[in-house]
Image (cartoon, rainbow, N blue to C red):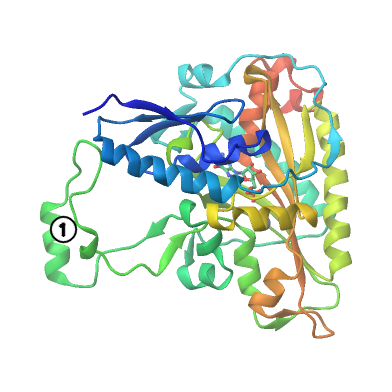
Amino acid sequence: MNSIAFQFAPAVMIPAHLIGEVQSKLAYVDERIACAQISPAGEQITLELKHAVSDAEKSQIEEKVQRVVVSMAQGAIRPKVQVLEDYLDRPTPFTADPMPELLRRGEISQEAPGIYALGPLLSRLIDWFESRFLDLAGSFAAQPYRFPTLIPARYLERVGYFRAFPHSLSFATHLPADLDQIDAFAEKAACDEHGNLNVPLQRFAPIQTLLSPAVCYHLYFTLADQTLPPQGVTATAVGNCFRYESLNLQSLERLWNFTMREVIFVGAKEFVLENRERARQRMQGIFEEMGFVYRVESATDPFFIGEFRKQAAFQSAFQLKYEIRARLPFKESTLAVGSYNYHQDFFGRHLNIRLPDGSPAHTGCVAFGLERMAFAFLAQFGFDPSHWPSSMQETFR
Ligand code: 5GP
Ligand code: ZN
């Protein structure tokens, strides 16, 4: 048996712009990995395993890591990052990590990795941001919708989600309608010391449903096989979203279960692009009034390894995604708190949503992560409301 940490060189050099992206995928390589680090220069990978393994097992794990590296880094071209707004140099009254204080105050209570209950301060902050987002939605006369937390597997299949993001899926099932099986479950079901239920998967009904990974998909499915009105559709909704993040789940920065507010545009290409741009400009005003410290820059979605290179290059080439990246002063880094997205006619084509002239509709959405928004705010402004923006003083006095 061998020691539990080992290092090796990646099969191809990992360029600086991909280090974070490749590292986040290493969390999905093998259940035995406890921690995976890529050196800042991209020339060394360190794996820490949960327990000792044989040399043969080590080579197997290394081979899987190399598959990720080669698939994502070989021949990768550095995308040109386009910066639309840069307010990262605004001063912040706070520089500490808000997590210890949130814990001390009982404001967060971890139920499991990536699953938190939030207390009154965080809930009120989220409500405050929600009213800003609802103002934004109102400025477009967006119609309110409420969508389920569950989503049918066949919906996600239809829009290629299984291929693009298999690693982050969360599945929902139930017991089969069978009295004997339900009785047996009621009598014997229990969790072991790891929290695992002692019931084999084959005792559950086949999976037809997942936990929804996004809000706007539900709107596109309500519009499937329809012709849109000439003015298009503008909608807003808030919902629970689920993206399993394995070892990457940490603090409120990366949750398995988080909430997203979206404003969604469906219509002609110009309608979607112009409204996405208007939404950005209106948010710029809201952020300026708060003195929020952030930057808006082009970005790509976290596609899984096989799809990553092609899809990420496509997204950057066509400027399909911009992220609002808030400064986290305590770690000198930024966190995506929202995004401005344009999907071209992808959903229009796959779901047969038509414009009045019969051509496929275009879609776009503006999405805000509510927990991240509140977390980034506290990281920049701290816990003393007298240091908060004047527009918040009334609410939080
Ligand atoms: P997107 O659709 O751009 O991937 O996600 C929209 C927003 O949802 C992100 O900008 C972010 O604020 C939030 N979000 C996405 N994934 C996570 C996550 O794992 N944890 C948390 N807390 N928020 C997330
Ligand atoms: Zn969306």
Farthest residue toward the bottom?
A: 358
Q: Residues within 10 Å of mark 1 (few under 14, many from 20)?
A: some
Tell which of 263 and 365 is nearer to you: 365
Q: Position of residue 248 (x, y in %)?
A: 48, 36
- Does residue 176 appear to the left or right of 323 in the view shown? left
- Does residue 394 appear to the left or right of 5 in the view shown? right
Q: Position of residue 123 (x, y in %)?
A: 57, 34
Tell which of 275 and 313 is nearer to you: 313
Split into 4 quadrants, where in the image is the C terminus? top right
Question: Secondary structure beneath disc 1?
Answer: helix
Visible in this render: residue 28? no
Residue at left 59%, top 35%? Answer: 20
Image-quadrant location for residue 63: top left
Q: Is mark 1 within 8 Å of ligand 1?
A: no
Visible in this render: residue 48? yes
- Does residue 137 appear to the left or right of 155 in the view shown? right
Judging by the rendered image, the residue that carries numbered circle 1 is 185
Image-quadrant location for residue 283: top right
Image-quadrant location for residue 326: top right
Split into 4 quadrants, where in the image is the N terminus? top left
Residue at left 53%, top 37%? Answer: 23
User: In the displayed structure, would residue 84 be above or below residue 140?
Assistant: above
Q: Position of residue 312 (x, y in %)?
A: 68, 53
Quadrant of the displayed image that contains ligand 2: bottom right
Q: Position of residue 161 (x, y in %)?
A: 55, 63
- Does residue 28 appear to the left or right of 269 in the view shown? left
Residue type (three-letter) at the residue carrying disc 1: Phe
Residue at left 81%, top 59%? Answer: 141
